[in-house]
Amino acid sequence: MTTDKKYWDLGAHRLLADYVGQSYDHASARKEAARELLQQFLVLAGKYGLPIGRADDDAIYLRLSTLKQAFIAIEANGTLAFRREGHNSTPIPLKFDPVSKMFEGAATDPDRVPEPGGIVPRQSALSVLADEAIRALSRKP
C-alpha cells in the first residue's frame, strides 16, 4: 500500500476528523486548542491596533463602545462562541480535528484553490475569528 495521500484519502480523513471531532469527548483538547487560537488572534489583532483584549483565560473582549463589549469565549465543551450583551450566544463555525488538535473553518476558503489532486481547503480558524471580530466591530452599538 502506498503512503501517498490521494484525493479520496484526504476526503475520508476530513470526514472522519469531522465526525470524531464532534462525536467523541475531546473537550480538553478543544479547550487547549481554543486557548492557543485566542492567543494567536490577540497577537494578530494587536498588530492592527484593534480594541481587543484578554477578558480571562477562556475569553477575549471586543470593545464596541465605551460602555459595550462583546466576547469570543470558550464554551464548556471546548468550542468557541460569540457573546454580546442582550443577545444569545452564537457558536463560531469551526471544526476541530482530533488528529492535528487544531481548529479550522467549517466553510471552504474562497481565496485558496486546491492543489492538483487535493481537496478544497477550508478557511483558517484565524480568518473565521477575524471575520467575527470585523462584523462585531462594524455594527452600531
Image: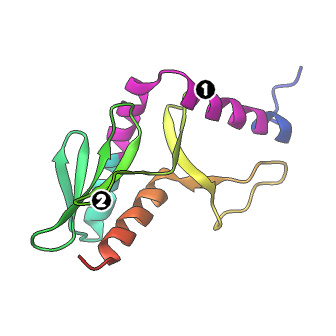
Q: Is residue 120 magenta?
A: no
Q: Is residue 133 above or below residue 101?
A: below
In the picture, the disc for residue 132 is: none
Q: Is residue 14 above or below residue 45?
A: above
Q: Which residue is mark 1?
A: 20
Relative to 61, 118 lies left or right: right
At label 1, counting other C-alpha atoms closer than 10 Å, the crowd grade (few under 14, some 14-19, many 20 or more) is: some
Give amino acid for label 1: Val
Magenta range is 11-37
The label nearer to you, 1 versus 2, is 2
Q: Which residue is mark 2?
A: 87
**Residue 110 placement: quadrant:** bottom right
Magenta region, mostly helix, strand or loop?
A: helix
At label 2, counting other C-alpha atoms closer than 10 Å, the crowd grade (few under 14, some 14-19, many 20 or more) is: few
Q: Is residue 137 above or below residue 46?
A: below
- Sequence order check, earlier mark of 1 and 2: 1
81, 39: nearer the viewer:
81
68, 106: nearer the viewer:
68
Residue 11, given in percent of the width and then of the height, sits at: 77, 39
Relative to 117, 57 lies left or right: left
Indicate the colouring scheme: rainbow
Q: Look at 36% across and 32% down and name the residue there.
A: 31
For the residues labelled 1 and 2, the Cα–Cα distance comes to: 30 Å
